[in-house]
């Protein structure tokens, strides 16, 4: 069998549809030689969140995915959204385009969102020279989208290298803009309906082995499955349609020049208003059905992921949360894991929607008051600095 090594590596991976599959090493394949990891995060993201800029932080993280995928002609490449940052694995054929996209998105985030975005492009040759690897699996939460899961220590090492100032991609010249087509932030925070929205990060401990950590992950997933819809923070019927003026402004900043921004804002507001009317009166427009679109949002959301560790933003009641915390504390005491956890009353959704007329739109979930960044800060307090966000 010839090892996949071309641009359609991720597309050719078999899809697993039960999230428990993240613990099965048979679902993972090594990233081909020659590929690179585009990595980014916000510097001092926890300070930005504390100042109330959590939507901007999430928008910045999602903008990296949008810019890179658009630079690669919206191809099917493995990525992960981390709240205040992101990672995308890219083939060598896209290196020059992605380097330009990272430089441009770094400049855009600085000028439009007033945040400092770090960006780096780390070759797999450097990862493997450290005795690490990047193994990729393909999880399909619905028949329309799939998300990458990462294993092997390589993505964590790449992030650590970026924070140390290695493999950095510097910002582009002022006013150079990335292609952020499809990036949006049109939804209000989604209130918890079970109890609390809890963002969890659990990573292997120094004394743990892979089998024990995999069992821990399986146990946490099993506990969360006892909650309605596995603790999914987005209602099955999708979020409530409403005008979100802060999100409209950020989306306009992503898609239009200063001179044309007011027109873009009006167009976005008109689109949202039309969807609200269609939704309220249960109408359709051509092939667009707002009811189907909203339910697809719930199906396509990435509220659980695995990136050298388990990351979840789930809606759980006090009983289930106590069981999860007890299991995490036990594993931490045994050296199997280190974990960070952050509670909040709502979830936040940032979206990548190339066109609402197709059903493959993607929705990135985080906690609305810090989520993964705050969980990572708690993790950093336990000495796991290499995985902490916003360092």
Image (cartoon, helix red, strand yellow):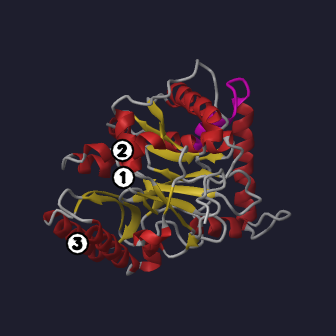
Q: Secondary structure at mark 1?
A: loop
Q: From mark 3 to mark 1, how far is it between C-alphas?
A: 23 Å
Q: Measuring from the top left, give residue 233's x and y in whole percent.
A: 46, 66
Q: In the image, which disc is placed on residue 157?
A: 2
Q: Position of residue 242 (x, y in %)?
A: 61, 55
Location of mark 3 (residue): 327
In the foreground, 43 or 298: 43
Query: Which secondary structure is most common in the magenta stretch?
Result: helix
**Cα separation between marks 2 and 1:** 6 Å
> Which residue lies at the image location 75% right of the left edge and 70% below the top edge?
282
Residue linked to disc 1: 153
Q: Which residues are magenta?
A: 245-261
Q: Quadrant of residue 313?
A: bottom left
- Label 3: how many Cα within 10 Å (few below 14, some 14–19, many 20+): some
Query: Which dot, 3 or 1, sits closer to the camera?
Result: 1
Viewport quadrant of the N terminus: bottom right
- In the displayed structure image, the side of residue 218 where residue 271 appears, left or right: right
Asked whether, in this view, residue 264 is left or right of residue 341, the answer is right
* Residue 220 at x, y percent in the picture: 32, 72
The x, y position of residue 247, in whole percent, is 57, 43
Q: Is residue 57 visible to the viewer in this orientation of the structure? A: no
Q: CA distance from mark 3 to mark 2?
A: 27 Å
- Disc 2 + disc 1, Cβ < 8 Å: yes
């Amino acid at each position: 069998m010839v090892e996949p090594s071309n641009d359609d590596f991720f597309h050719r991976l078999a899809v697993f549809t039960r999230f428990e599959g993240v613990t099965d090493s048979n679902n993972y394949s090594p990233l081909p030689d020659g590929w690179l990891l585009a990595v980014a995060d916000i510097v001092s993201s926890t300070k930005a969140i504390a100042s109330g800029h959590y939507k901007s932080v999430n928008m910045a993280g999602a903008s990296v995915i949008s810019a890179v995928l658009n630079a690669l002609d919206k191809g099917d490449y493995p990525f992960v959204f981390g709240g205040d940052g992101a990672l995308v694995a890219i083939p060598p054929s896209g290196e020059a385009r992605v380097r330009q996209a990272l430089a441009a998105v770094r400049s855009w985030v600085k000028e439009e969102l007033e945040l400092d975005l770090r960006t780096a492009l780390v070759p797999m040759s450097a990862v493997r020279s450290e005795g690490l690897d990047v193994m990729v699996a393909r999880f399909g939460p619905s028949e329309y989208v799939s998300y990458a899961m990462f294993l092997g220590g390589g993505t964590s090492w790449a992030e650590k290298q970026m924070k140390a100032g290695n493999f950095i991609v510097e910002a582009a010249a002022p006013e150079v803009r990335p292609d952020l087509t499809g990036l949006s932030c049109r939804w209000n925070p989604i209130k918890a309906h079970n109890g609390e929205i809890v963002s969890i990060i659990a990573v292997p401990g120094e004394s743990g082995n892979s089998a024990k950590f995999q069992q821990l992950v399986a146990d946490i997933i099993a506990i969360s499955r006892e909650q309605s819809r596995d603790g999914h923070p987005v209602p099955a019927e999708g979020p409530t349609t409403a005008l979100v003026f802060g999100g409209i402004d950020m989306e306009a900043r992503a898609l239009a020049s200063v001179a044309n921004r007011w027109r873009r804002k009006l167009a976005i507001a008109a689109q949202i208003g039309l969807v609200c009317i269609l939704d309220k009166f249960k109408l359709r427009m051509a092939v667009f059905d707002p009811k189907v679109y909203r339910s697809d949002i719930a199906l396509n959301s990435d509220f659980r992921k695995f990136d050298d560790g388990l990351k979840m933003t789930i809606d759980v009641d006090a009983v289930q949360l106590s069981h999860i915390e007890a299991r995490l504390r036990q594993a931490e005491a045994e050296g199997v894991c280190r974990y960070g956890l952050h509670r909040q009353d709502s979830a936040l959704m940032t979206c990548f929607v190339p066109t609402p007329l197709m059903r493959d739109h993607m929705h990135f979930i985080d906690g609305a008051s810090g989520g993964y960044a705050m969980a990572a800060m708690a993790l950093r307090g336990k000495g796991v600095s290499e995985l902490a966000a916003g360092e």
